[in-house]
Structure formats: C-alpha cells, structure tokens
C-alpha cells in the first residue's frame, strides 16, 4: 500500500527561500579587517537572497547551465555564501577549491572536476594567478573584492601570446557583474538527486577524490546539523564558521544557517588566534565550529590576554580530528565555553556523530560520552568490522573498522564527466573501490560503538601502531601527553622495530617557556596507559606538521623520521 503523502523534492532552493524570506533579518557578518581595528560587514539574509538571484542571472549570462561546475577559491565570506546558493539553485554545482593545497593538487582537482567558472577572492589572487594557465577548463574568472583586474587581464593575454595552452579565462568583477541584474530569479524545479555541490578529500594518500553531494543529501544533512543533539541551531544563534567553506562545505553550516535562521559570522582570512579573538569580541557569536588545533591556538592567546571578551560564546563544536580531553577541560574551566566533540568525513557531508551528554547522566558515564566522538545521528547506520571481516557487537568494547551508510553518505567517488557520480551499479559507481562494500562506506577509522550509539575512535587504521601483535592507539597516547602542562602538541607515529615490528615514536612540541624531559613524560604516561604502550622514542619538534585543513599530518612526520630529519632520544627502563 502506498502512502497518501505528497512527494515534494528536497532542494537547496527551499533553504534559500526560507533563509532570505522567513529569516530575512538574520545576518551574515564578515570580518574585513582586524588590525589596527576590527571592521565588520553585516548583510541581511534578505539582501543575500537578492544577490544570489543576481549572481544566478550573471552566471546564466556567462553560459552556465545545468550540471556545470562553478568553482570557488575563497575564504569564508558573504560572496562565498552567495555562490553556495546561486550555483545549486540554478541547477549548477558549487565546487569549493581548497586554497591551502599545493598548486598542482588545486589544478588537478579543478581539471578533474571540469570547473568552467571560478569565483575567487581578490586577496587570494597572489596564490591563484600562477595556477591559472594549468586550469584548462576554466572559461570565466570572477573576482570578488578590489583588485587590479586590467593587470590580470593583460597577464592572461601575455600568457596566450607566449603560447600557453588554451585561451585563458575572461576576467570579471563580482560586484560589476551583479549590479545590473534582477534580485529575483525563475528558479527551476530540480530533481532532488541532482548534483548540487562537490568537495574533494584532502588526499593524504594518493590523489584527492571527489564527492558529489545531491540537493537531497544536503537538505537532509542540514536538518540533522540543526538538531538539538547536533549543532543545536536556531534563529537566536550567531554561528562563527571557522571551519573553511572549502573543507566539506564548512561542515554544512551555511545551509543549516538558512534552514534554522541562525546568523553567520565569517572570519574571512583572519584565522590566526589574535585576529580570531578580536573577531569574536567584536561580532559576538554564540557558537562556533573548527578543528582542535585552531581551538588550541586560540586558548593559548586568550589565556595570555584575559581582557579579551569572548563571553558571548556558549559553546563551540570541535571536530575533524580527536579533541584532547585536556583542551575540552581548559575551555570549560578557564573560559566557561563548552567544547562539543563531533566526528565526520568529507564522504559523510560530513556529520556522523556529536557528543552531547544525555540528559540526567552524570559522573563517569557522562564524562565517557562527553569525550567520545559522539552519538550517531538516527539516520546514520554504523557497524564495526573485525580484521577478518566479521561484524563485531556494538558493546562499547569490541574495536574494529567502522563502516557507515545513510542518506548523506557517499556511495562512490566522482570519476569525471557528467554521469560520474552514480551509485553502485551505475556508470561511475563504486566498482572495485575498496572504500565501498555492499553499499557501506569503509571509514578507515577504528573504534567501538556503545549500545546507546556512542562512537569512541581509537585511531585511524593507517595510524594505529601494531606492536608485537597488539594495537596501540596513537590518539590515546597523544591525548595523555597533551594533558601534561608542559606539552603544547604531541603526535605519535609507529616506526619499525626489530623486536616488536612497530613501536610508537612521540613527536612533542613543548609549551612556551616550559621544559620537560622524555623521562618525565614517560613517568607521566606510566600512570595513565599500560606499561608496554609507553614510547621509548622521543623527538622534540618546533611544530607538528599540519594538513591543508589543520589536522596533524602524520605522513609528513613519518617522512621526516625516515629521512633522518628527527632528532630521536631513545629511552627505556
Ligand atoms: P576529512 O574527510 O578530511 O574531514 O577527514 C575525515 C577523517 O578525520 C575521519 O575519517 C577521522 O579519521 C578524522 N576525524 C574527524 N573527526 C574526528 C574526531 N572527532 N575524532 C577523531 N578523528 C576525527
């Protein structure tokens, strides 16, 4: 028997119409300067809605049609938000490029995605210009902000004269392009399964892989992001999106904001701790989202400058890599800000789980859940798979690789062309890709799931240290080391060992003005982890290398060790 219900298509257009209509007085605030003083631009969602229509007209005028990829090379700001809505609502696909990737990866991604239009912030032209000749599919470059565009045009022409391949893009100014256009647009009816946005994985192993999100997946994910058990967004909130718009669509926050009416605060390029602290004090967000290293840097700055008023922040979402418990405690105790731990992946739009303590729970049980990666969304199915492929019980104890499936989780990677985003069995489907099994995504993360749905990650499969047949969690050692007051950062990698196969090596960044020895750190760990897990190899480093999205880059740390670039102290009992 079929239902009697309507079958409306889920589309980003509904988010745009609700955001710019019902919540038209909510605002997006972008930081324009932070020094010598903070300057903010605040624009209502109603005006953003008008600009989105203008931009859609302009894009259509440049020949953008259904399915065409509109790339961005931008910070988090108002114009970027406008592209997030204009491209998908007109039937095209928004594709944020990661501005921090090495140039050859940016061009690889732009060419692989077949981007035809590129919208860039003027402040990023210095990085972008040398990449343009290698972007073979980009026909139009739209620049937001002040820049000497005639100079840029001349440079592109000179490139052509010098025999560079392709005609090079035509350059436009964002504001000029929009100025003459209408603030309403005849938005098309779209199939909810149609591509709306795409992002590439950060590609720490092999080439980056494209994930193509649909209108349906983005709308369902947005609903999930807003839930009280997730980011708890409502029209009374102002959310500071520190997580870049080029990293998994800023965790879906720009879409969730229009759905809930929450206002947005966009930091632009002002991400160093001192600038960010100034933006928080001036724009007064109530909540925020970013990776642990960012919150760590901000904490150090705020502790040194207690006069900075960040009291508007009720909480901040922390995810993307494991949040050390010491960081969570420091925010609660020193600043009265609750860090809320969340887990996800590019392939998951990204949100999978959020660590909010169930009402009424106190003591050890509450603490365990607060420090976990969080409780799965009801619409995300998860299972734990042992090394021999057997499914393990979700008893909070049995650890294995985590596999997930659900309506905002990728079924395959983009393989190029227009039909490349298919599900299993269609062109571009998962095929033999080992990341997918029977309609499930293999996350590469190792952990346990408790009977009440909380995920606790031990490690990534490729980071876990296999010592004498036992597994050592690099994340647990890092968390315990970072709980030492003299340690600012710690990254633990597995290195070859004649006797045990692999043993942990701890790379430690000492806190400013502190001194600590490997022997003291071993003694600290002795109270906290099993004796056989304590590292014998120690290297003090200036900084732990970071990926383009601010996570510990253990691949680079490993390479440094292999190349003999780490000064290792060996210390055993
Ligand atoms: P990305 O696709 O770049 O966002 O990376 C996804 C990966 O980041 C996951 O598979 C995890 O290994 C890691 N990750 C994300 N959030 C967390 C978290 N809260 N704790 C530990 N690891 C995390």
Image (cartoon, helix red, strand yellow):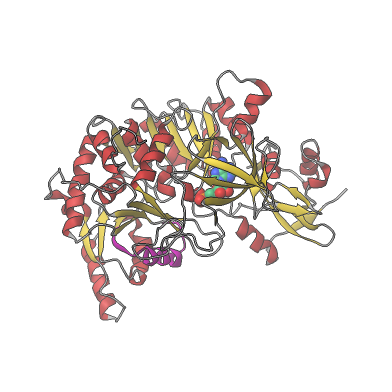
267 or 452: nearer the eye?
A: 452
Extreme-right residue of the structure: 573
Range of residues picked out in magenta: 99-118
> Would residue 45 be counted in the magenta stretch?
no
Residue 507 in the figure: left or right of residue 225: right
Could you tell me residue 369's position as x and y percent?
61, 30
Q: Is residue 381 left or right of residue 516?
A: left
Q: Report the residue at 29% width, 81% height from top.
A: 162
Classify residue 346 as left or right of residue 6. Answer: right
* 107 within the magenta span: yes
Q: Position of residue 63 (x, y in %)?
A: 19, 61
Position above or below: 348 against 97: above
Judge by depth and name the residue closer to the eye, 420 or 24.
420
Does residue 505 appear in this view? Answer: no
**Image quadrant assignment for residue 523:** top right
In depth, the one of 86 and 154 nearer the eye is: 86
The quadrant of the image that shows the N terminus is top left
Q: Residue 55: give x, y in percent of width and height.
A: 20, 50
> Can you say whether 12 is above or below 427 in the image?
above
Question: Looking at the image, which residue sits at the far front?
Answer: 1
Please state the total of marks drawn on the protein image.
0
Q: Is residue 512 above or below residue 119?
A: above
Viewer-proximal residue among 267 and 73: 73
Asked whether the viewer can see residue 116, the reply is yes
The residue lying furthest to the top in this view is: 360
Where residue 498 appears, x then y in whole percent?
83, 62
Residue at screen point 69% across, 42% down: 476
């Amino acid at each position: 028997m079929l239902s009697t219900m309507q079958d409306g298509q889920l589309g980003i257009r509904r988010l745009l119409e609700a955001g710019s209509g019902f919540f038209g007085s909510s605002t997006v605030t972008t930081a324009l300067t932070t020094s010598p003083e903070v300057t903010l631009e605040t624009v209502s969602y109603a005006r953003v809605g008008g600009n989105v229509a203008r931009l859609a007209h302009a894009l259509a005028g440049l020949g953008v049609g259904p399915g065409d990829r509109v790339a961005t090379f931008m910070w988090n700001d108002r114009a970027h938000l406008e592209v997030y809505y204009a491209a998908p609502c007109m039937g095209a696909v928004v594709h944020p490029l990661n501005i921090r990737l090495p140039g050859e990866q940016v061009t690889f991604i732009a060419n692989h995605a077949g981007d035809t239009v590129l919208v860039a912030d003027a402040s990023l032209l210095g990085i972008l210009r040398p990449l343009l000749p290698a972007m073979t599919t980009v026909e139009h470059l739209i620049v937001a902000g002040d820049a000497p565009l005639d100079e840029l045009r001349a440079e592109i022409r000179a490139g052509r004269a010098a025999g560079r391949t392709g005609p090079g893009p035509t350059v436009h100014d964002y504001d000029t392009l929009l100025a003459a256009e209408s603030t309403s647009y005849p938005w098309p009816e779209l199939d909810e399964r149609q591509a709306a946005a795409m992002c590439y994985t950060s590609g720490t192993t092999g080439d980056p892989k494209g994930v193509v999100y649909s209108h349906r997946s983005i709308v369902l994910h947005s609903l999930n992001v807003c839930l009280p058990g997730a980011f708890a967004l409502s029209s009374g909130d102002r959310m500071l999106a520190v997580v870049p718009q080029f990293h998994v669509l800023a965790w879906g926050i720009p879409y969730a904001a229009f759905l809930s009416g929450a206002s947005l605060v966009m930091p632009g390029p002002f991400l160093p701790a001192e600038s960010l602290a100034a933006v928080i004090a001036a724009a007064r967000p109530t909540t925020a989202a970013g990776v642990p290293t960012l919150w760590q840097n901000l904490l150090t700055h705020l502790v040194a400058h207690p006069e900075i008023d960040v009291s508007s922040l009720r909480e901040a979402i922390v995810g993307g890599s494991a949040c050390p418990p010491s960081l969570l405690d420091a925010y609660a105790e020193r600043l009265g800000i609750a860090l809320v731990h969340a887990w996800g992946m590019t392939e998951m739009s990204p949100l999978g789980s959020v660590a909010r303590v169930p009402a009424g729970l106190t003591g050890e049980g509450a603490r365990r859940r607060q420090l976990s990666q969080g409780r799965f969304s009801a619409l995300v199915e998860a299972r734990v798979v042992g090394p021999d492929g057997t499914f393990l019980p979700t008893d909070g104890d049995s650890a294995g690789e985590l596999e997930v499936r659900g309506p905002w989780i990728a079924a395959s990677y983009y393989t190029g062309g227009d039909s490349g985003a298919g599900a299993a069995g269609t062109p571009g489907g998962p095929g033999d890709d080992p990341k997918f099994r029977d309609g499930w995504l293999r996350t590469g993360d190792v952990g346990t799931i408790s009977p009440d749905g909380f995920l606790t990650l031990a490690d990534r499969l490729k980071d876990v240290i296999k010592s004498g047949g036992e597994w050592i969690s690099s994340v647990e050692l890092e968390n315990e080391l970072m709980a030492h007051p003299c340690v600012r950062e710690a990254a633990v990698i597995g290195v070859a060992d004649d006797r045990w196969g692999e043993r942990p090596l701890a790379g430690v960044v000492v806190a400013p003005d502190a001194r600590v020895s490997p022997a003291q750190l071993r003694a600290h760990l002795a109270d906290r982890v099993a004796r056989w897990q304590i590292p014998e190899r120690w290297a003090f480093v200036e900084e732990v290398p970071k990926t383009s999205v601010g996570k510990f880059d253990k691949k680079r740390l490993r390479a440094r060790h292999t190349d003999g670039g780490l000064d290792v102290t060996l210390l055993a009992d």
